[in-house]
Amino acid sequence: MLRFKNPALIALLIQIASTLMVLAFISSQSFLAFSLFEWGVLQGILASIFSFAARMPYWWAAIHLLFLPLSIATLALDISPLWFLIIFMGLWLIYGKTYKTQVPLYLSSKHVPSALASSLPTNRDFSFIDLGSGCGGLLKNLAGIHKNGRFYGIESAPAPFLISKLRNMWSVSDYKIVWGDFWQHDFSKYDVVYAYLSPVPMESLWQKACREMRPGSLLISNTFVIPGITPYKSIPLNDFSNSTLYLWKIGNGD
Ligand SMILES: C[S@@+](CC[C@H](N)C(=O)[O-])C[C@H]1O[C@@H](n2cnc3c(N)ncnc32)[C@H](O)[C@@H]1O
């Protein structure tokens, strides 16, 4: 089975290959006289077949099927290209390089700080980092509760980073947020590493945590498990998506 390191790149290749095949077919024959939209539908069908053949997740087939026909239909609406640039820029500001990281923006629920209360140290200082800290809400709440903690965040998407920086400037709670890629960041100085990411990076995250984090320190994941590694503790959040916090102790015989 193919492993998709970067599905966006594979999707682009599928779109290019299916478009080239349809163009080659059009220029090699004269008996079929379809409209541009109908050729677009044919390309969509071909691209979704390629998507199945490449074993991309099933919802990619629907995207491939609709992409070119909808693009052609949209051209008929005569919308200014500026709108597409504005929407594209807006999505990039909010989501950054999601096409590469495969981690979109969604925020931890308000239940997380209270659920974590009994798992964070109370009788000594500790350092905590939120990997991909989004708009900084979790850090602000935790820093307000745990005065013995030093709280840090690292975020790579422009708009969430800017929002969290502004929040930070006006907040009485003490926490720091930096712009950057957590894969390039050293985890060794943190007692607790918190991640609310997606299923995709969990295995690599575990390997990085085992390489860099000190024995006895804590890796916490909201919702997403590490394949094959049993957490030492699970805390149900009772929030709108019924999610769970999973906790692993580094060097705990894993
Ligand atoms: C699901 S959100 C979680 C936001 C926040 N931690 C919370 O719990 O509310 C994941 C965030 O991680 C960010 N992100 C993804 N990959 C990243 C990376 N390699 N470095 C820094 N931030 C990243 C995304 O931009 C997104 O804002």
Image (cartoon, rainbow, N blue to C red):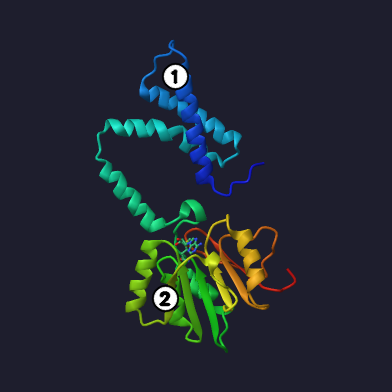
Q: Which of pointers 2 and 1 lies earlier in the amino acid sequence?
A: 1
Which residue ends up furthest to the right in the rendered image?
253
What quarter of the picture does the N terminus occupy?
top right
Residue 83 lies, with reference to residue 192, above or below; the image says: above
Mark 2 lies on residue: 140
- Circle 2 or circle 1, nearest the eye: 1
Task: Please say if 83 is above or below 253.
Answer: above
Q: Position of residue 221 (x, y in %)?
A: 57, 66
**Residue 195 rendering spot, x and y as whole percentages:** 54, 66
Residue under label 1, please give it: 26
- Crowd band around label 1 with a 10 angstrom C-alpha radius: few (<14), some (14–19), many (20+): some
Quick one: SS at disc 1?
A: helix
Where is residue 217, by image quadrant? bottom right
Vertical arrangement, residue 77 with respect to residue 4, above or below: above
Residue ranking furthest to the bottom:
123
The residue positioned 52% from the left and 74% from the top of the image is 129
* Front one among 80 and 237: 80
Relative side of 28 to 168, left or right:
right
Q: Residue at x 63, y 74 (%)?
A: 213
Q: Is residue 10 left or right of residue 92?
A: right
> Would residue 32 be found to the left or right of residue 244 on screen?
left
Which quarter of the image is occupied by the C terminus? bottom right
Please tell me which residue lies in front, 56 or 89.
89
